[in-house]
Image (spheres, rainbow, N blue to C red):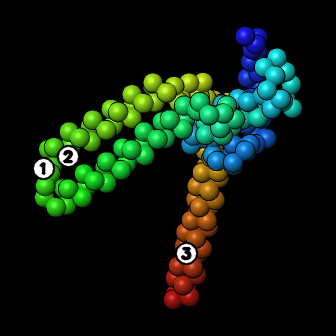
Amino acid sequence: MKERRDFKKWVVDLVYEAQEGCCANCGASLEQTGFHRHHKDNNPKNNSIDNLELLCPRCHYAQKGTDNPYTRHQAQEKRILEKLNQLIDLALENKLSGATMERLLDAMSMSLKISRRVTEVDYGLEHIPPSIKMQRYVAERKLIQDAFLEGFKEGAKSVILLLRREENEGEQNE
């Protein structure tokens, strides 16, 4: 078995920012899907920053070959969706009660949850680094505060102009 070393957290943060939060392979949003760390040269001992790329689960598992847990889980999802379409048709034809439909939907949901566990689709899945999440939050807050203050200033200017106009009209009427 190969000795595996992990990339340092700050390296992952840098690569996440450099990839702009997107999969290095397909460009999918890693914020939506989560990501896996991937050694470009497949050498788990080489932890240089140039050897790290962040991949969405679909792309990472595709690199692993045919025994792909993501593909197995997707097959389960496809079977469930096909069954769901059949159930909807039956319900529309009044051949299936709402209570039965609800129980079947619960069973399908449970089946998908079990599939995720059994296939280990989410194993090793990471999400947006907390430091980057905090930076984005602070930046968004600053934008909102700046917009609020700008709106407040514009509103105050409008009120001052209106008061001056009323004052001038009052002086002219005298």
Residue 132 can be seen, yes or no: no
Q: Residue at coordinates 55% horizontally, 75% vertically from top-left?
A: 162
Name the foreground residue: 125 vs 64.
Answer: 64
Q: Residue at coordinates 14% horizontally, 44% vertically from top-left?
A: 99
Quadrant of residue 30 within the rendered picture? top right
Name the foreground residue: 144 vs 153.
Answer: 144
In the picture, the disc for residue 97 is: 1
Residue type at numbered disc 2: Met
SS of the residue under disc 3: helix
The location of residue 125, given as percent across then percent down, is 59, 28
Residue type at numbered disc 1: Ser
> How far apart are the two marked residues, 2 and 3, measured between alpha carbons?
62 Å
> How far apart are the two marked residues, 2 and 1, measured between alpha carbons?
6 Å
SS of the residue under disc 2: helix
Q: Residue at coordinates 69% horizontally, 49% vertically from top-left?
A: 27
Q: Residues within 10 Å of mark 2 (few under 14, many from 20)?
A: some
Of badges 2 and 3, the one in the foreground is: 2
Quadrant of residue 126 within the rendered picture? top right
Name the foreground residue: 99 vs 67.
Answer: 67
The location of residue 5, given as percent across then percent down, is 76, 15
Determine which residue is flagged by label 3. Answer: 162
Instruction: Give the mark count.
Output: 3
The location of residue 38, given as percent across then percent down, is 73, 30
Determine which residue is flagged by label 2. Answer: 101
Label 2–label 1 contact, CB within 8 A = yes
Residue 167 located left or right of residue 36: left
**Mark before the other along the chain sequence, 2 or 3:** 2
> How far apart are the two marked residues, 3 and 1, measured between alpha carbons?
64 Å
